[in-house]
Amino acid sequence: MTRTAAFSLFLLVIHIAVFAPACRAQKDGGKYSSTNNKAVKAYEKALEYYDQRNNAKTLEELLTAVDKDPNFVEAWTMLGYIYTEEKEYDKAIDAFNKALAINPNFYRGNFYSVADLQMTVGKYEDAKKNFEEYLKSPKKDSLLNALSVLNLKKCEFAIEAMKTPVPFEPVNMGAEINTDGYEYFPAITADDLTFLFTRNVRPDPNNPATDWQEDFFVSKNVGGKWSPAVSVGKNINTPGNEGAPALSVDGQILFFVACAEMGDYGPGKQGYGSCDIFYSQQVGDKWTKPVNIGAPVNSKYWETPPSFSSDGRTLYFIRGIITKEGVKNRDIYMSVLQDDGSWSKPEKLPDYINTPGREESVYIHPDNQTLYFASDGIIGMGGMDLFMCRRQPDGTWGKPVNLGYPINTSADENSLLVDAKGKYAYFASDRKGGYGGMDIYVFELPQQLKPEKITYMKGKVYDKQTKAPLSAMFELIDLATGKQAVLSYSNPGNGEFLVCLPANKDYALNVSMPGYLFYSKNFSLKESPVDKPFYMDVPMVKPNVDEIVRLDNVFFETGKFDLRPESKVELDKLVDFLQKNPSFKIELRGHTDNVGDDKSNMTLSDNRAKAVYQYLIDKGIMKERLSYKGFGETIPVDTNDTDAGRQNNRRTEFRIVAK
């Protein structure tokens, strides 16, 4: 619901609860402010029509009433409410102002009503004065009092924000994306090559009687231009509604929302109640049948829209819970993917992000450090505003920052998407000059609102011998912290993968798949340009006797044989491999470069191999399955004339002796 729709509903509640007894005073033996019989008669007819929910006739009689008596304060007040319900805000403001000019104390709630409308249309100075007037009332409704205090702060913020606007030049994405219908909720892959969004369409374009429905459309970036958008296909799009899409950074997992209409989630989809989150995986260029993500993420409440972190571990979403009092609380939750494939119990984000107001969208940037979301409960421009907050060094979220004017206005802003590079942001708007309905726009994000710099790595996992693509699990470890940076899988159809990584760091890569030896590599992104991807293909080898596997992520202190802590991840992979293959026997092999004398290098390489040997025994691997040997500098795999060559020669390996 938009702010203006929520506002008119709220005013209706106030009208029934507070103003209605006064406006019907004559029928209860009291007196109206008017003594003009014709005006009173028209006003009472208006009340009858209003009870019948006939706003057109209500307006007609109210206008007659104020024509017969221009000082009829009840009629002007009720005109303000009806014009608000009809979304004729300028006329509503005029009606409330006339009621206040006649008698400001007849109903002090009129000060709040006109102030809220003035804030809605961006007349902040006028709104500020009327909120202040309401707060001077001797008797105040407790809810209106709290809202007046909050909205007064919003007016003060907006007045100052408009004095220092942020750069904002939105550009329509064009006819390849937008139509005369409605396009919204965009999603984009980290490499900027796939753009997916929701479009409201008619199942039968030639039959205007058919209901509109939400489907997903996709466009590809070809040579820097977006191709004409096409349907994602029948596996995803159904005769029901599919909305609020979120792509994993590689575009291989699609999360989206389906809602129960008359208890039905659409063909082949089962749910938990209200709106649920579903997911589908891309195999080659086809999407699998959607699956409900299940409890505890989905519940009997309303879950939407999702956003999936680039490390493949955390899902953010909005949950709407209707209280016993009928109030719908909408807050941001997060759930973490566990090692066994289940999702953790959702946790609400802190109360300085979640407010007593509404949070309606959330987007975790691929940097995994910057969160963008919409809220009407934090000081802003008056409606639903866009905010951002950054993850702090201790892992907590910092305080929200308003994106500023004119990105935020007195209307509702929602559903912001920021590309992986942090340069461009996308949003939907029904602003003038578009193709009709709602269009998707793009703008360059101001510097102070940009996320952390990241880069991305692309590649393909394949069988080294047959070249066939493989679906393997891979993880990336930040070598500085030893913590997992990414956990993901290559595409089952083509073996491709794409992962986002913070720039200027060193990483260890571990790839594993049943039936194959695990693969390890380490690499540095410190010299890699953030605007270009880092490419790495991964050849997987089946475990045959005499096969030699390099342990690239086993590290020792310089000139010593003490294992460094970051070696644990790789060595535990080897432990796991040996536990799953109990008949295998291996030989640990150590190698050095040619710096130093032969004897010292032979001793050092032997001790390093022995250190790995002992680690495996300590982890429960029987020593009868293990042996070790140092080769010193005798088996180089690269030149010893360069630093890079010598580094390549310093290595630890294992050879399969028996299986």
Image (cartoon, helix red, strand yellow):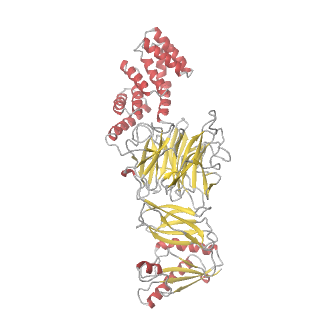
Q: Quadrant of residue 99?
A: top left
Quadrant of the image for the C terminus? bottom right
Q: Is residue 214 left or right of residue 107?
A: right
Seen at 57% across and 40% down, the residue is 200
Residue 163 x %, y %: 31, 40
Asked if residue 370 can be seen in this view, the reply is yes
Q: Nearer the viewer, residue 590 or 417?
A: 417
How many marks overall? 0
Asked if residue 105 can be seen in this view, the reply is no
Q: Classify 121 as above or below 461.
A: above
Q: Classify 635 as above or below 331.
A: below
Instruction: Report the residue that reaches farthest toward the right.
Output: 268
Residue 559 x %, y %: 42, 82
Residue 82 x %, y %: 48, 23
Q: Nearer the viewer, residue 543 or 153?
A: 543
Q: Classify 43 as above or below 326.
A: above
Instruction: Report the residue that reaches farthest toward the top.
Output: 37
Seen at 40% across and 27% down, the residue is 114
Instruction: Report the residue that reaches farthest toward the bottom.
Output: 599
Q: Quadrant of residue 165?
A: top left
Q: Nearer the viewer, residue 448 or 194?
A: 194
Seen at 63% across and 55% down, the residue is 286
Q: Quadrant of residue 515?
A: bottom right
Seen at 41% across and 85% down, the residue is 595
Q: Classify 159 as above or below 367.
A: above
Instruction: Report the residue that reaches farthest toward the front.
Output: 223
Q: Is residue 237 left or right of residue 532?
A: right
Residue 639 x %, y %: 45, 82
